[in-house]
Image: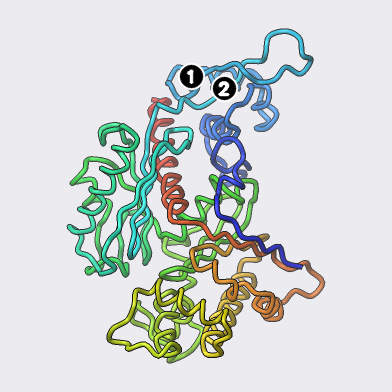
């Protein structure tokens, strides 16, 4: 009934190339030149004849437009595709010029920031991480940490900041992707921060900003299980609870770019206090800080002298596995609230697949059979196959890799605009 599996490496899902495999259609269709470029990047390497079939265009159009992209330095011809008959010269293929552009993707979090540097073809060239104090930070402090993190990943790749065309960043909270502003984030001391403008003023590099659940969803769409899927959802459970949604092969952000805040949907009126300041949010029953808050009571710890949330959760999980009834009750209650949240996602969006992702998915209580059975009971599924569920317990780097997709998409638009000009 349910397809539940744990994964540790997003490359286990990845095919050759990067980016969505399915082409956008209808109102979402992109200019043909961009479709050609993105098809080549998604395939990794492809012949012109494959382009004509996949995009249903004429051979003449394929020849003309690929010639333009080659002249612009965005594509190049290579040999190496296998011969169909075993005789004659191997067919000439096209691939993205990887060294043509470089981007950095960054995941900002409560205790460790992560960064990945990739080329224009999406190949990861270097990564770095930077431990940080789990406190809210001013804009200047956060930019200083990003500066230190970028210096680390640039040194690892043997690159300078002048060689970076854009930076993508994912962070928790309410994020306006279109403007680069952050109305609210639990990582920052102030509200309504124009992070993109401040970053570009300091570093001279364009910054693309999005909610961290969206960048994780982009990681699945560009590099993982969602590459060949038109509709799927990602639900993340870590320091907060987030959701990303792909509809018709594109990330859906809502009318104003700040939708799908699953963690702040209300599941209990006048319920537990959420870090957003309101009560009864789903996050207040599932996120790290919520479980750690409950763990302090279950493990008889002094709430004024608590361990880190991670250490507290590890202790709680160990106690639950050892048979501690109070610890098991906390996880089971969290699982019931998760089943409620998932059933609402299914009822509203009817996705083909929901991917449960984040470090907390190592806790099997959150995706136990009874949790998924409860989700099924809460959903109108008469006569239909239930939504598939997968669990991906990725590490921090996959979030940063998803942020590179933000930057790659923006750099691609700019590069193709310059090519047309």
Q: Is residue 28 above or below residue 284?
A: above
Residue 192: image location, x then y, percent: 26, 65
The answer to whether residue 156 is visible is yes
> CA–CA distance between discs 2 and 1?
9 Å
Q: Which residue is mark 1?
A: 70
Left/right placement of residue 96 relative to residue 203 reads right
Q: Secondary structure at mark 1?
A: helix
Q: Are marks 2 and 1 in contact (CB under 8 Å)?
A: yes
The answer to whether residue 184 is visible is no
Front one among 220 and 182: 220
Quarter of the image with the C terminus in it: top left
Residue 52: image location, x then y, percent: 67, 26
Q: Residue at (47%, 90%) from the top-left corner? A: 269
Instruction: Sort mark 2 into few (<14), some (14-19) or many (20+) by Cα contacts within 10 Å.
Output: many
Asked where in the image residue 276 lies, by quadrant, the reply is bottom left
Instruction: Sort mark 1 into few (<14), some (14-19) or many (20+) by Cα contacts within 10 Å.
Output: some
Left/right placement of residue 373 relative to residue 204 reads right
Residue 190: image location, x then y, percent: 22, 68
Residue 332: image location, x then y, percent: 58, 83
Q: Is residue 9 above or below residue 49?
A: below
Q: Residue at (44%, 41%) from the top-left corner? A: 409
Q: Is residue 299 above or below residue 114?
A: below
Front one among 163 and 207: 163
Left/right placement of residue 222 relative to residue 193 reads right
> Looking at this rendering, what residue extends furthest in the right direction?
383
Point out the frontmost of discs 2 and 1. 2
Q: Is residue 101 above or below residue 194?
A: above
Q: Secondary structure at mark 2?
A: strand
- The dot on residue 94 is 2
> Looking at this rendering, what residue extends furthest in the front direction?
322
Q: Residue at (31%, 32%) from the top-left corner? A: 158
């Amino acid at each position: 009934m349910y397809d539940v599996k744990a994964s540790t490496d997003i490359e286990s899902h990845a095919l050759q190339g990067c980016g969505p495999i399915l082409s956008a259609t209808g109102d979402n269709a992109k200019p043909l030149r961009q479709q050609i470029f993105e098809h080549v990047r998604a395939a990794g390497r492809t012949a012109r004849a494959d382009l004509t079939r996949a995009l249903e265009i004429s051979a003449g159009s394929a020849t003309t437009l690929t010639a333009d992209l080659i002249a612009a330095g965005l594509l190049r011809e290579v040999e190496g595709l296998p011969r169909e008959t075993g005789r004659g010269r191997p067919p000439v293929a096209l691939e993205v010029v990887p060294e043509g552009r470089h981007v950095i993707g960054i995941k900002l979090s409560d205790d460790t920031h992560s960064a990945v540097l990739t080329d224009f073809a999406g190949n990861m060239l270097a990564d770095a991480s930077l431990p940080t104090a789990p406190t809210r930070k001013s804009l200047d402090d956060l930019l200083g940490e990003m500066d230190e993190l970028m210096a680390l990943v640039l040194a690892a790749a043997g690159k300078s900041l002048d060689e970076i065309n854009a930076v993508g960043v994912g962070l928790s909270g309410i994020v306006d992707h279109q403007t680069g502003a952050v109305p609210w984030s639990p990582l920052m001391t102030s509200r309504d921060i124009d992070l993109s403008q401040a970053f570009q003023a300091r570093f001279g590099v364009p910054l693309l900003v999005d909610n961290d659940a969206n960048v994780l969803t982009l990681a699945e769409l560009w590099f993982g299980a969602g590459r060949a899927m038109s509709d799927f959802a990602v639900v993340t459970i870590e320091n907060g609870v987030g959701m990303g949604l792909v509809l018709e092969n594109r990330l859906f952000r809502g009318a104003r770019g700040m939708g799908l805040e699953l963690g702040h949907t209300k599941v209990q009126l006048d319920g537990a206090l959420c870090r957003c300041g309101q009560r009864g949010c789903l996050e207040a029953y599932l996120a790290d800080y919520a479980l750690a808050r409950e763990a302090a009571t279950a493990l008889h710890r002094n709430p004024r002298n608590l361990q880190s949330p991670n250490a507290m959760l590890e202790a709680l999980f160990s106690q639950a596995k050892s048979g501690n009834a109070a610890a098991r009750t906390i996880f089971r209650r969290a699982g019931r609230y998760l089943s409620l949240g998932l059933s609402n996602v299914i009822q509203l969006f009817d996705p083909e697949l929901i991917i449960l992702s984040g470090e907390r998915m190592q806790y099997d209580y959150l995706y136990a059979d009874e949790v998924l059975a409860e989700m099924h009971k809460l959903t109108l599924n008469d006569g239909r196959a239930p939504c598939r569920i997968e669990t991906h317990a990725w590490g921090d780097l996959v979030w940063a890799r998803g942020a590179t997709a933000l930057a790659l998409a923006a750099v691609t638009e700019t590069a193709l605009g310059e090519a047309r000009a």
